[in-house]
Amino acid sequence: MKKKRLDNGTYCYCSVSGNHSLEEFLVDAKKEQENAKKNPSLTDGEEGLSLLFISSLPWITYTAMVQPVPCPADSNPRITWGKYFEQEDRILIPVTLLCHHALVDGIHMNTFYEKLNAQLKNEVGD
């Protein structure tokens, strides 16, 4: 589920399947974003509890983030990306992972960040 900014500054959800290669995902995401612009909605549908929420804040760099959830039982993972920045000749990007502790432990979050870091190094280098 992705929020898409509309021309009037408001947002709507855009659902994209993650069962594709990166190239197929990007093509599908572009198509779904255009559909969402034509029929904007903030409803996540019947399968809302099975969604992964990904947001980006390309305008700001941050060091921490708190995300409200609609109810205590909400267990949807949320990943947020911020604006990248340079520090000591390195390019850094803030990435926040919010998970419900009943379903995810610290080791799982560590694995996520290790794999993300390895993938980014593979894509862009050190």
Image: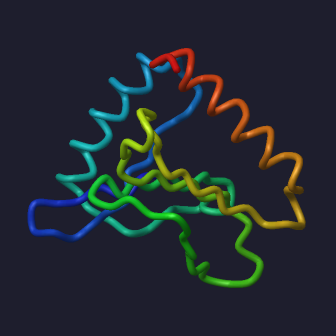
Give above or below for 67 relative to 11: below
Give above or below for 117 relative to 23: below
For image coordinates 52% across by 64% down, the residue present is 63
- The x, y position of residue 52, in whole percent, is 60, 52
Left or right of 100? Residue 50 is left
Q: Nearer the viewer, residue 87 or 85?
A: 87
Left or right of 83? Residue 10 is left
- The x, y position of residue 76, in whole percent, is 67, 61
The number of numbered discs placed on residues in the rendered structure image is 0
Q: Residue furthest left?
A: 7
For image coordinates 60% across by 59% down, the residue present is 78
- The x, y position of residue 120, in whole percent, is 54, 26
Q: How is the image coloured?
A: rainbow
For image coordinates 52% across by 35% down, the residue present is 17
Give above or below for 80 relative to 117: below
Q: Nearer the viewer, residue 107 or 87?
A: 87
Q: Residue furthest front?
A: 88
Left or right of 30? Residue 63 is right
For image coordinates 23% across by 59% down, the residue present is 5
Q: Nearer the viewer, residue 95 or 63?
A: 63
- The x, y position of residue 83, in whole percent, is 35, 51
Quadrant of the rendered image containing residue 49: bottom right
Quadrant of the rendered image containing residue 34: top left
